[in-house]
Image (tube, rainbow, N blue to C red):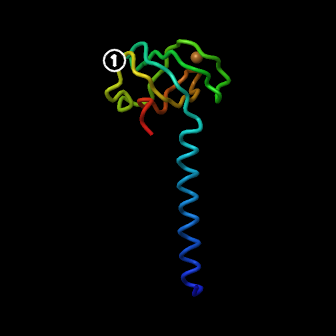
């Protein structure tokens, strides 16, 4: 291999690893739940959720504020979802929520 080719191969391998890491990081913090209520006007979704490790929260049903209206998508009551939540100004905010089957 010429030095040039070695550099190219290394760069390719590195960017592949970065991509894999980014995908992993994105899904690692996702929790699972089922939608109990969608309140688009109020910007809220009620979820029966499983354990949320990032918040050290046990399974329960609770209301979440939805970060941006775009997140509502076609979500409806009864949908199984995967979601990410952050604590902002004392509220629990959904920063990501997608159908459970989606990757
Ligand atoms: Cu909860």
Position of the N terminus, as image quadrant, is bottom right
Above or below residue 60? Residue 80 is below
Quarter where residue 71 is shown: top left
Residue designated by label 1 = 41
User: Residue 68, position in %: x, y?
Assistant: 40, 31
Q: Residue furthest bottom?
A: 2
Q: At x 35% / y 32%, what residue is drawn?
A: 70
* Coordinates of residue 36 in the picture (x, y in percent): 43, 13
Q: How many residues crowd around disc 1 within 10 Å: few (fewer than 14), some, or many (20 or more)?
A: few
The residue most toward the left is 74
Front-most of residues 63 and 82? 82
Q: Residue at x 31, y 27 (%)?
A: 74
Q: Which residue is most to the right?
A: 56
User: Quick one: 27 or 85, which is closer to the camera?
Assistant: 27
Residue 38 at x, y percent in the picture: 38, 16
Task: Indicate the quadrant containing the C terminus: top left, top right, bottom left or bottom right.
Answer: top left
Comparing 96 with 67, the one in front is 96
Position in image of residue 44 (x %, y %): 42, 18
**Quarter of the picture for ligand 1?**
top right
- Residue for point 55% across, 21% down: 91
Element at label 1: loop
Is residue 54 rendered to the left or right of residue 83?
right
In the image, what residue occupies the spot 41% across and 29% down? 99
Please give the count of numbered marks on the rendered protein.
Answer: 1
Q: Quadrant of residue 42?
A: top left
């Amino acid at each position: 291999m010429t030095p040039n080719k070695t550099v190219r191969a290394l760069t390719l391998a590195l960017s592949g690893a970065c991509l894999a890491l980014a995908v992993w990081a994105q899904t690692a913090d996702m929790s699972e739940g089922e939608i109990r209520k969608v309140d688009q006007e109020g910007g809220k979704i009620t979820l029966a959720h499983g354990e949320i490790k990032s918040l050290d929260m046990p399974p329960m049903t609770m209301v979440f504020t939805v970060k941006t209206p775009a997140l509502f998508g076609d979500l409806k009551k009864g949908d199984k979802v995967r979601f990410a939540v952050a604590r902002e100004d004392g509220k629990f905010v959904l920063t990501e929520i997608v159908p459970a089957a989606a990757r």
